[in-house]
Every structure is written in structure tokens, then in C-alpha cells.
Image (cartoon, coloured by chain):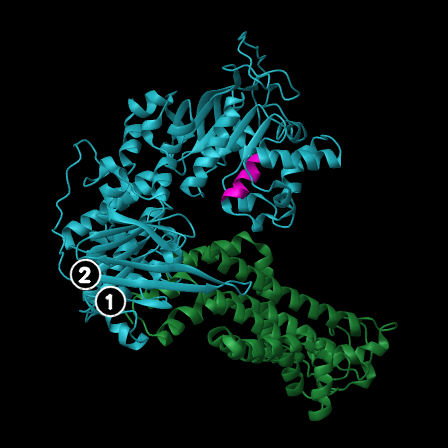
Amino acid sequence: MTALSVPPTRAWTLDRVSGLRARPGTVVALAVVAFIVLAALVPGLLTSHSPNAIDLQHSLGKPSLAHPFGTDAAGRDLFTRVVYGTRQSLGIGLGATALAMFIAIVLGFSAGLAGGWVDVVITRVLEVAFAFPVLLLALLLISIRGPSMGTELIAVGIGSAPGYARMVRGQVLNVRESGYVEAAGALGHPRRTVIRRHLFPNAMRPLVAVMTLGVGQSIVWASGLAFLGLGVAPPSPEWGALLDSGRDYITTQWWLEILPGLLIVVVALAVTSLGRTLQHRLEGASR
Amino acid sequence: MTVLNARTTASTRANTPATTDTGHQAGDALLTVENLRVSFGPAEVVKGISFTAHAGRCLAIVGESGSGKSVTARTLVGLTGPGSRVQADRITLDPGSPGEGDLTALGERAWRGVRGKEIGFVLQDALVSLDQLRRVGDEVGEPLRLHGWGDRSARTERVVELLESVGVPEPEMRARQRPYELSGGLRQRALIASAIALDPRLLIADEPTTALDVTVQAQVLDLLAASKARGTSIILISHDLSVVARLADDVAVMRHGEIVEYGPTRQVLRRPQHEYTQALLDAVPSEHTRGTRLVRGDAPAAPRKRRPVDRGRPLLDARNLTKVYRGPDGVDRTVVQDVSFELFGGETLGIVGESGSGKTTAAKIALALLAPEGGEVLLRGAAWSTLTQRQRRPLRSRVGVVYQDPLSSFDPRWSVGRILGDALSRGPKPPSSKAETRDRVFRLLEQVGLGAEHLDAGPLRLSGGQRQRVAIARALAPEPELIVCDEPVSALDVSVQAQVLDLLTDLQDDLGVSYLFISHDLGVIHHMSDRVLVMKDGKVVERGTADEIFTRPQHAYTQRLLTALPRLEQAS
């Protein structure tokens, strides 16, 4: 490896800052994401209540200054539960995406690099998996392992892996045929060096943005599973579980359903919007 | 938003009796443009140009990239696009049609009436310009349909006639095919058929032959010439002075949005008044420029100081190479068949051929990036193509490569410094420290005429010429004996091409490096090569010294190529 690699230049940083200034949507999205990251890491900072403190005196209370999202049937502060649920929801979103990406990289690179029958077998398996409903897969897993955060994570992760794997394979094939991979070979670099220095980073580059999009998607999926009672067990404040328990009151105490639901939408939107911005930026930089 | 503020000018028809068979008056001023200005935001790309197109004549607008020639063409059909601002004292089309009078005042709807009917437009890249999902016939017939010409069956018939008139063989079958099923030449002809469908009085052709092989180019130029003879006025946009010499009656030379010289073709190309025109003409490589530098400045062209070619054992010895590819239909195609050549130390061997002739495949076999099905390549008399990858790796530094598109040959994440540092590390004496790497990268940059300020730049921030210089520096870095140059200047403007060719010859004079030089451009091949191979359909049809090939071609195909080649001297 030669020593002439360039440190990140000031121009890039300035560009990033000015880009943010130009797009208020990105700033809002960043603020939302910063907020939920904070909620996931130190929920105590955002609320003084305890997520599981039952107060039957104030059950099903309307949103108020003391309880901005109202209280649920057991009198627990809904805002606090939402804040404390962030860790699980975000954890599932990140974890599931990471798992999906790991599977995708292993399969996509094997198929793209090996070619031949390996490629044919992996591609066929991916096509079948792609057609397989994620919900069915989740049901299968849950019936084997029982509902838990881990099961939810694995189900969503495996469910979204085939889509990523096909993308990874496509990228690998693309980059493998690129001029710079051929040029590196013509300079006499061994194959593994070419893969490590050129193929892997360039094939993965467009996937960074897709991964960010995937986190938002996974949060929505996980919430959906929990809503169907297939996710984290009820007392836990995971977002989907909150929706599940709020369902019975939707006609009388709407906030139990609408406010957590709205939050999921806002978070998914914010993460997706950031992903898009990232995508534009990376594609802009490569063209 | 397009702002048009021009005063309407009544146009008058000149009284010329010479009527051609389309009824247009030969020599009449058909389109008059005065003081045309086009800007995008603060940048003015066309700075007040005036010209006139005459019936039955061809006006060529020549210039390099960024000269504003294509923008001018698009303005004339009202397609400058969003964010543009077009101003002109006058753009008038001669009367006799709905499009007559002042074009600057036209709205989008009125433009649609003029485009296709009064003014036909032929774009450069037929593969992009034709809708891939529609049949060729529908695409060609589109202007007929839009302007309400005839009924469906009459249009189908007319389309076949049109395709036949532009020399498309089996027009009925071709009309039912889709654009990707046609070769580049056929697509370009289909596009011209579409442009002339309604027999427009003015045809604007933007680089109509740039992507085409020389024999196909000749056919397309003949087609345009025939159209001109029938009284159509043609505005030809081109960077290629030889093409212009063949077709144009008048030439306007554009540079930085201005017309620097404007006059009859013969006068502009033979006795140019402006130094830029002279420089452009000097930069065209041909038989006359052999052994000299192309970029002259004020001094007369100095002869090269060649190192003697070592005629001992060949540096590269390719014996009976054969390469077979299996097509998607399962049929094997022999793309290189029994090709043999020798390349000596310090020599330039040119391989010339049209697309699909197998020249690039032959180059890849020489580079040992492809394994041949038959035959072998020896390097300095020792095995090369038959080695295993592992055995060959340490020897790779002896053969460098320069591609047509340098940008795609650079990792987009890497800076120029890193690209060159990486190449240095593959040489026989890899630098041992950061400081030494840096020093040697600077020296390489200097050798190819680039400043140290490019060290940290990404390839994206460089111009086309600078990128090709970096590519040459990368090829030089491991101190190779041979550099394979695969169409190294095809993507460059003629003046930049001249600089890069000069750089290659200078490096050969300094270092004694050999070139295997691949090009479709006969002028470039003649300028660069000591000996030449002519390839067609995977076979070598003729070989000899450059002078033998270009002055006394033996094979019919070579003769055809040379006849098809447009030359500056053809200026009429």
C-alpha cells in the first residue's frame, strides 16, 4: 500500500455543511434521528416518568402537559413508553439491517465472484427466497423460537436479505467488469488485492445509502410484526407492541394508537430521507 | 425560462430562378441568424453569432467541445432546455410555410409545427435518440404521424420508402425491428430517414457520423450530399475538419461561443486567416504530419529525434492467435483468427480496423488479459501468454496499457497521487519510503506535462486530456518496455489529441518505449506507426510499413478504407 492516500479534505466538509444549509428537510430529518438516538441511549434524559409505573388513578388519560401523549389503560405515561421503546425498535431496525447485509454480502460476493454453478445456485435460492412472504417466515420462526426481540430481529433480517443480496451481486458483477479492476490486474496486482482495494469498496459504496433506507423499513416491519402480536411480549414498550395494545381503544382514546403510529411514520420518514440524501450525494460524487 | 426579445423582421424571398426538384431555390438564404446569444444562468455559451444557411448548400459549424456549436444547433430547433436564455436580433426562416418568419417569437406549440416539418434534426448518438422499445418504423414515421401525414397504411409505405432512400437494405424487415437490433450505421441512417421524412427544407445534423466507422461514415456523408443536391439546406455540426471538407460549402469556426472565422470551405481550410483555425488544421494527424510534432506554436514543425528500432529479437511476438466467443445464441464466433505479428524494441506497431474487427481483442491477448484459444504470445522470446497468472504477475510491469476511456480505468475513490503511487509500487524498483513515492509521482506528473497541483485531485476533477496524461503516467510508472494503447485519443478534441500524440512520441524518443497502437482513425495510425496491420473480421488482411499501406494499399479492403477516408484536401 502506498502512502499517498489523501486525507479527507476541507472542501468535502464544507460541501457537507453547505448542503445541509441548502436543504431544510435534511436538517429536520437529522434532528429526528438525533432525537431517537438520544432516546435509545439515555431515555431518562427525555422523560422523568418510569415506563412501567402503573397509576390506575389516571388510566386512559388525555394528552396533557404532564402526559404529552396521554396515559394507557394501566395509567402508564405513553410518551415515556415510546421513549423507552426506542431502544428496542431502533435496535431491531439496525440489527435486522446488519444481519440482512451480512447475509447479502456473503451470498452476493460468492455469487458475483465465483460465477458458474455457484452463481446459478445462489441466484435461484435468492429468487425463491425473494418470492417467499416475510410474514410467513416470521410466523415459522416464532412458532419455533417463541416471540421475542431476537426472533423479530432475525425474521426481519432474513426476510430482507434476498433483496440486498441481489443488489450486492449486481454491483459485484458491475465493478468486476470495470476498467479500473482490469487496469489493476494489468499492473500485476494479485486477485485478492484487487478485491480488497477496488472491488469490495466500490461494490459496497451505493449500498451504504440503501442500508440507511433499510433501517427505516425494518423499523416499520418490526412494528408490524409486534402489532400482530408476533413480536416482543406485551409489557415491553416496543413501538409495535404499543400499537397492538392501543388497538382496542382506537374509537375512544385515539391517542393511544395515533401518536405512537405517527412517531413510527416520522422516524421511518426521517431515516429514509437521510438515506435518499446520502444516495444522491454518493451517486453525485461518483458521476 | 426562455426569454426571447427579438424584433420581428419581415423576410423577403430573393429572386433566383434556379429551381431544384424539391421546388426550393438553390442559393436562397433559407435561415438567417443575426447576433444569437445563448446563456445558462450567468454563463454565456453563445456570444452573438451570425450566419446564413442557403438552400442546396451545407454550412458547417466546427469547433471543439465547449465551443457552443451544439447549443447553437439546439437553439435552431428550440431545444435549448430549461434554464436557458436565448436572445437574437433575428432568426428567420424564409417564407412559404407555417414556420416562416421570425423563429425567436415561437412558443413551444408553434415550435412543434416547425420541428420535423420545416427543420429536420439529426442527433449524434442514434442508440440514445431512438426509443429502444419502439419499432424502427414507428420511430421513423413519428414526424409523419405528428404532423398528420396520410393514414396509417400510407405512412407504413412511406417509411419503407424513406428507409430505402437512405440505403437501409431490407427496409420492410428493418422497419419491424427495434433499434438495438440494428448496427450503428443503420441506426444513424434510420435517424436521418426520420429527419427527412417530411422533406424539411433545413436539415441540422449534430455530429452525425462521429460514432461511425469510416466506411459507414462515407455512406452517411454521401446520403447527406444527395439530400443537399435535391435542394435541402444542411447545417452540419462537427469537430472533424475532414468530414467538413467533404460535405460543407461554407464553414464557421467556433471557439468559446464566438465565430472566429467564417467563409467558403475551400478558403477557410486552405488559407485560414485566424490562428485558431490554423492550429486546428495543424493538429489533424495525417501522412503529412508523420515524424513531426502536431502542436507547433510559431516555430515550424521540428522533426522527431527517434531512437533506432532494435530489429534483433522481437519484443513481442504473437503467433497465430485465435479467440472464439460464444454468442448469446449459443453459436461460436471467431473474433480473432490466426493473427500473427512482431513488435520490435522502440517501434510503434499500429493496428487499424473498424468496429468488430478484433483489434481490441488482439490487444487484450497481447496484454495477457485474455487467453487465446489458439496460438501464443512471447515476450522477449520467453513464454508470456502461456504462463500461469502467478508466474506472469512479476513480469506484468514490462507491459503497460492506456485505454480509450481513462476515467473508467481509475478507481473513482482514488486520487491521482494514489493511482500513480500504486503503479510505481509494481515496478522493478518500488519506492521504499513515502517521501520517495511522492518524489517519483511528481516526476511522473512532470514527465507527462502535469503540475504538482493535480496530485490530490480525483480523476473526476480533471479534463479529458489531463485524465489521459495521468493514464499515460500510470502506464509509464513501472518502467515498461511496451505500452499497449487502445484507442487512446478517440475521445479527445483534435487539439488535445495533438498534445497527447505529441506526448507519446516525445516519450518514445526519450525512453525508447515501444507502442502497440490501436485505432480506428487512419490519420492517427499513419501519423504514429512505423508498421501497420489492417484487421477486418478478426483477420489481418494487410501488413506493411505505414507508407506502403497508405500509399500503395494492396488489399481491396484497405483501398476501400482509404477511399472512404475524408480528407482535408477534398475541400471544394
* Neighbour tally class for label 1: few under 14, some 14-19, many 20 plus, Cα within 10 Å: some
How many labels sit on residues?
2
The answer to whether residue A62 is above or below residue B566 is below
In-image side of A256 versus A172 (left or right): right
Q: Quadrant of residue A89?
A: bottom right
- For chain B, what colour was chosen? cyan
**Residue B182 among magenta residues:** no
- Residue at left 27%, top 59%? B475
Q: Which residue is mark 2?
A: B314
**Label annotation for residue B509:** none
Density class for disc 2 (Cα within 10 Å; few <14, some 14-19, many ≥20) is: some
- For marks 2 and 1 on the same chain, the one whose residue lies earlier in the sequence: 2
Q: Is residue B510 above or below residue B386?
A: above
Residue B326 can be seen in this image: yes
Specify the segment rendered in magenta.
B185-193
User: Residue at point 58% right, 61% down?
Assistant: A276
Up the image or down, A118 lies above or below B252; here it is below
Q: Amino acid at mark 1?
A: Leu
Q: Position of residue B323 (x, y in %)?
A: 39, 64
* Secondary structure type for disc 2: loop
Which residue is denoted by mark 1 in the rendering?
Answer: B378
Residue B450 pos. (x, y %): 25, 50
